[in-house]
Amino acid sequence: MVTGEYQHALDNKGRIFIPAKLRDELGTAAYVTLSMDRCLSVYSEESWNGLVEKVNALPFVRQRKMRPLFAHAVRCELDAQGRILLPQSLRDWAGLVKNATVVGCNNHAEIWDSESWQSVLAEEMSPENIGAVLEELEF
């Protein structure tokens, strides 16, 4: 399970440090792609393969809707310092320039522009939203 929230800066080459805890959960290589929010999704090889299996089980017409997810996906290997290189096109799409927040999100991580993440977090951290989430989970 991928959990936690970590603040990091992209270097001038577009690399971001992946915290040791997340590296343990994601492995030595990860798949990075678009998200339904304006951030990037980062999957371990195991989680990515699970996603691919789900897509392969869909009828072809529904699989075609997944094109952007796969067209923009890249396999990123961690370097010796625990960083991955994010392609410019993905950085542009997610608005990543300097400060980024890496967020655990169950079976994957997300990489957000830190300012954008703070806006989302302010909305999602309301007592009403937390209550609705717990109710949905039947707690």
Image (cartoon, rainbow, N blue to C red):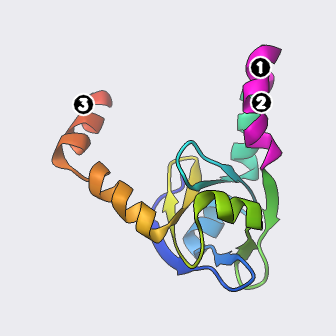
Q: Which residues are magenta?
A: 56-72
Q: Amino acid at mark 2?
A: Glu
Disc 1 marks a residue whose amino acid type is: Ala
Label 3 and label 2: CA atoms lie apart by 30 Å
Read off the residue under disc 1.
Answer: 57
What residue is shown at x 71% (from left), y 59% (from top)? 90
The disc, 3 or 2, on the residue closer to the chain's N-terminal end is: 2
Q: Residue at x 37, y 55 (%)?
A: 120
Find the distance from the CA under tag 2 to the CA under tag 1: 6 Å
One can see residue 29 in this view: no
Location of mark 2 (residue) = 53
* 59 relative position to 138: left or right: right
Residue assigned mark 3? 135
Q: Quadrant of residue 84?
A: bottom right
Judge whether 108 appears above or below 54 on screen. below
Left or right, 15 with respect to 75, comes to: left
Q: Position of residue 10 (x, y in %)?
A: 62, 79
| Relative to 70, residue 6 above or below | below
Is residue 56 among what the camera can see? yes
Tag 3 near tag 1, CB within 8 Å: no
Quadrant housing residue 128:
top left
Does the stretch in magenta take in 28? no
Q: Amino acid at mark 3?
A: Glu
- Identify which residue is drawn at 58% across, 75% down: 19
Q: Is residue 63 magenta?
A: yes
Alpha carbon of mark 3 to alpha carbon of mark 1: how far? 31 Å
Disc 3 secondary structure class: helix
Q: Nearer the viewer, residue 10 or 93?
A: 93
Q: Classify 50 as above or below 94.
A: above
Mark 1: few, some, or many residues within 10 Å (few <14, many ≥20)? few
Q: How many marks?
A: 3
